[in-house]
Image (cartoon, rainbow, N blue to C red):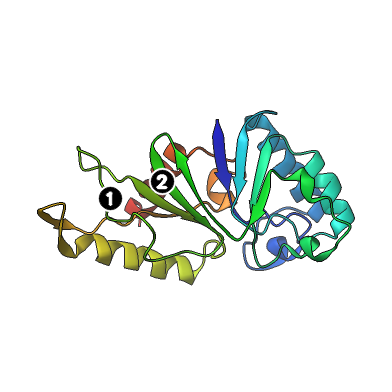
Amino acid sequence: MRYYIADCHFYHSAMNERMDKRGFKTVEEMNGYMIQQWNSRVRKNDEIVILGDLSFGKWKETEQLVGGLNGRKYLIIGNHDRFLNEKSFNRNLFKKISGYEEMYDNGRKVILCHYPTFCYNGQNRLDGFGNPKSYMLHGHVHNTVDQILIDKFVKETRDTKRVIQGKEQGIPCHIINCFCMWSDYIPLTLDEWIVVNERRRLAK
């Protein structure tokens, strides 16, 4: 099984005090809850793609943290993953570390980047039933005004008509923010993130 999650920000106390206002009393309480939620879903041999900003902690404490998180971990580098700057950090804790990746998930292409990509590879590709064959998964913006702007872009793009595969239709646009708070800090599958994303958009 493969799961995705973004912007955990382990060891980042400001996520409680400002920005996300997560509601934990201490950073230790936040870390403990996120570890519990992660390991409640992810098993040893599952794949987990981290879409950036995993940890704000120092390299040694982040090394210990990563070792205690279940799964075969792929890290898409975020702007706060500064622990990677320390040469002593054990990069072998991750199966792969990169700034951008393209993978396949049950026959669908997933474009993976910490930052949202508005015109992503394979965006217009649909299967024989009109379902998207490509998704863009990201993090970075949390639940901010930037996400509101992304939602507006997605709606306008889907409402814009273009001839695709010989048929005039709305332009496919499936940009999904895998923000950890929207899943109660539990890594989710692609199908689960699709549901979370559409429900969130329709609830506005």
Disc number at residue 153? Answer: none
Q: Is mark 2 on a helix, strand or loop?
A: strand
Residue 59 visible: yes
Residue drawn at (77%, 44%) of the image: 93
**Badge 2: residue crowd in 10 Å (few <14, some 14–19, many ≥20):** some
| Amino acid found under the numbered disc labelled 1 | Arg
Outermost residue toward the left? Answer: 167
Q: Which of 159 and 26 is in front in this view?
A: 159
Label 1 sits on residue: 125
Task: Point out residue 51 in the picture as x, y percentages from the top left corner.
Answer: 59, 54
Determine the residue positioned at 52% across, 62% down.
Answer: 143
Q: Can residue 186 be spotted in the picture? A: no
Give the percent coordinates (x, y) of residue 78: 64, 62
In the figure, residue 67 lies in which quadrant? top right
Given residues 174 and 122, the one toward you in this image is 122
User: Which of the pair 80/18 is nearer the observer?
Assistant: 80
Q: What residue type is labelled 2?
A: Lys
**Residue located 47% across and 64% down the image:** 116
Can you identify the residue that label 2 sits on? 109
Q: Do the residues labelled 1 and 2 touch (CB within 8 Å)?
A: yes
> Secondary structure beneath disc 1?
loop
Q: In this view, does 189 lie above or below 31?
A: above
